[in-house]
Amino acid sequence: MRSSQQRRRMVTALCAAAAVVVVAGCGAGSRTGAETAAKVACDFAKPAQAVDVDVLAYNSSAIDPFTNTMIKSCSKNDVTVKHEPIDFGGQVQKTTATLAGETGTYDVVETYGFVIPKYADKSKLRPLDDYFTKFSAEYGLDKINKGMREAMTYKGKLYAIPMQAQMLVMVYRKDVFDGLGLQPPKTFEDMRQAAKKIQDAGTIKYPIALPLKASADIVTAFDATLGSLGKNLTNPDDHTANLDSPESQKALEQLISLKPYLAPQVTTFDQPAVQQQLYNGGAAMAIMFSGRMNDLVQQSNSKFYDKFAFAAPPVVDGGDVRYNALSVDGWSIPQNTQVDPELLFELIAASVSEDASKAAIPAAYPARDGMVTATSSPYAAAAIESVNAAPPAEPYPWTSEISNQITPVIASVFIGNVSVADGTKQMQEIAKKVLADYR
């Protein structure tokens, strides 16, 4: 069972960041143009010779403000900051590749609290504590939320500078809901009932849109469902897994129960594809990471821009923990970069400075304390409610490895190629093998 004390600590820390954070979802599809990047102080000493700095970060409306600010503000004094557009899946693959060898392709890598333990445990990332202390006053780093810094810490060492956090938020078509006398769903059962009424009314054929891409997003959905049912993936104290538990079986069943209301091709949908369903009027409700929400209310993106409303995501089946996932995005420096790490640290510190963070609102919900309020955007209040009822992270080096390996099993169960019972057994065996390497 998830520790209530652990959850309270995480929620308290996150809430201190202005109830913490609205963030980016995974995948390509940014609607934040480079021309909106802030020009901030980036006062590093000119290097002895010209330097190219290659940055690896996926494109989304909530990440791009920080990447673009780094490029715009720090490309000077014989330093050229470079970034090529990439989607989330590509970023994950390139991160693995660049950290694998003695030298890498990238000098700054966007990372998440989810993967910090894995890479830090294998000494793939450079500890940043000394640089943080040295440059804290210059870049106001002490104003970055402590809870988020802890999410980027492993065994007492800081491995990334947080830029923002993220949580799941529900978006729904208020005009459709009001027309049928519906309220935002509080539970999965509410969501199914609302979807059926919308279907029966002939309004929208597939009322629910979820990012359930079989190669990535579907494992996030499973973990969010399992968390709402009160279970972690693993028990860190005795290195056992919970993937053959009754809660694990129920989590799969609950996801499958939504299929009648999801488009048949849903296992190909990442978050930009879900956004597109909403833009086109093909869905009446969706649950995505909060950094995707600002795009929905832009008139240039959809004729329904003024019809969207926001709420915290539902619980799966009772209790107070919502279908949710909390994550922190930040900048890390690979251990194998050939560029001066102190120079690199100043670049990432500048990109998350106070001015840079202010400029990122409302597309992002920055990591700095007191920066966002409930009135900062149409979805900020929903994000604040969401973070107060979210399962805690599982900051262990095996978490991401297990998640990656069970993803195809979850997808096979969801599409009906593997039974729920067999799927939970397969996942449990996978987790056992991974955990055995950490005993």
Image: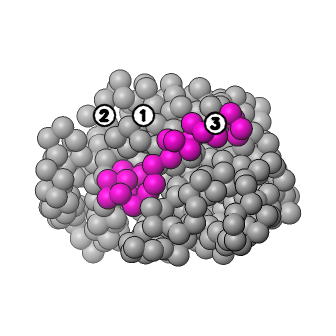
Residue 139 visible in the displayed image? yes
Asked which colour scheme the image uses, the reply is one colour
Name the image quarter holding residue 425: bottom left
Residue 267 visible in the displayed image? no
Q: Which residue is mark 1?
A: 321
Q: Nearer the viewer, residue 207 or 220?
A: 220
Please tell me which of labels 1 and 3 falls first in the chain: 3
What amino acid is found at the position of numbered circle 2 in the picture?
Arg
| Residue 212 x, y percent position in the rendering | 47, 64
From what the image shows, is residue 45 above or below residue 271?
Answer: above
Q: Nearer the viewer, residue 286 or 410?
A: 410
Q: Is residue 163 magenta?
A: no
| Residue 195 x, y percent position in the rendering | 54, 53
Q: Which residue is mark 3?
A: 136
Pointer 3 local density, CA inside 10 Å: few below 14, some 14–19, many at least 20: some
Q: Which residue is mark 2?
A: 2
Compared across the picture, whether 187 is left or right of 57 comes to left
Label 3 sits on a secondary structure element that is helix
What amino acid is found at the position of numbered circle 1 in the picture?
Val
Q: CA distance from mark 2 to mark 1?
A: 10 Å
Q: CA distance from mark 1 to mark 3?
A: 36 Å
| Residue 183 x, y percent position in the rendering | 62, 38
Pointer 1 local density, CA inside 10 Å: few below 14, some 14–19, many at least 20: many
What amino acid is found at the position of numbered circle 3 in the picture?
Ser
Q: Are marks 2 and 1 in contact (CB under 8 Å)?
A: yes
Residue stretch rendered in magenta on the structure: 114-140
Please tell me which of labels 2 and 1 falls first in the chain: 2
Name the image quarter holding residue 391: top left
Quadrant location, the N terminus: top left
Compared across the picture, whether 408 is left or right of 353 comes to left
